[in-house]
Amino acid sequence: MTGGELPDEPGYYWAKLIKPSGMPKQDDWRSIDWEIVHVVMNDARGQSPSERFAVFIPGVAPMQQIDDLEWGPRIAEHPPS
């Protein structure tokens, strides 16, 4: 999988965390593999995807900024739990 464009709508996507926001500096929080993340609306009035969306990543407590990730394709439906 190779990196793609920033998401333009909420949903589930393949992504890799490359520069974590709000994480302890001594720990390496970057993704070593592609994983499914959940993009949610953060501010509907935002002018850019970076302002409109935030990202939930499994195992990472603070929401991440959309620019913190390398993006793969959108997943058509909610992934199985």
Image (cartoon, rainbow, N blue to C red):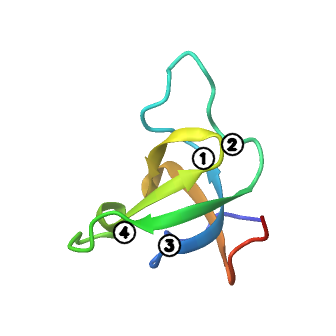
Determine the CA span between mark 1 and mark 4: 17 Å
Q: Amino acid at mark 4?
A: Pro
First in sequence, mark 4 or 3: give its number: 3
User: Given contact means CB atoms under 8 Å apart, are the residues at marks 2 and 1 in contact?
Assistant: yes
Determine the CA span between mark 3 and mark 2: 18 Å
Mark 2 lies on a secondary structure that is loop
Question: Where residue 58 sits: x, y (%)?
Answer: 65, 48
Q: Which residue is mark 1?
A: 17
Number of marks drawn: 4
Instruction: Please tell me which residue lies in front, 50 or 56.
Output: 56
Determine the CA span between mark 4 and mark 3: 7 Å
Q: Residues within 10 Å of mark 3 (few under 14, many from 20)?
A: some
Q: Amino acid at mark 2?
A: Ser
Question: Where residue 78 sits: x, y (%)?
Answer: 68, 76
Q: Which residue is mark 4?
A: 49
Determine the CA span between mark 4 and mark 2: 21 Å
Q: In terms of image quadrants, where is residue 30?
A: top right
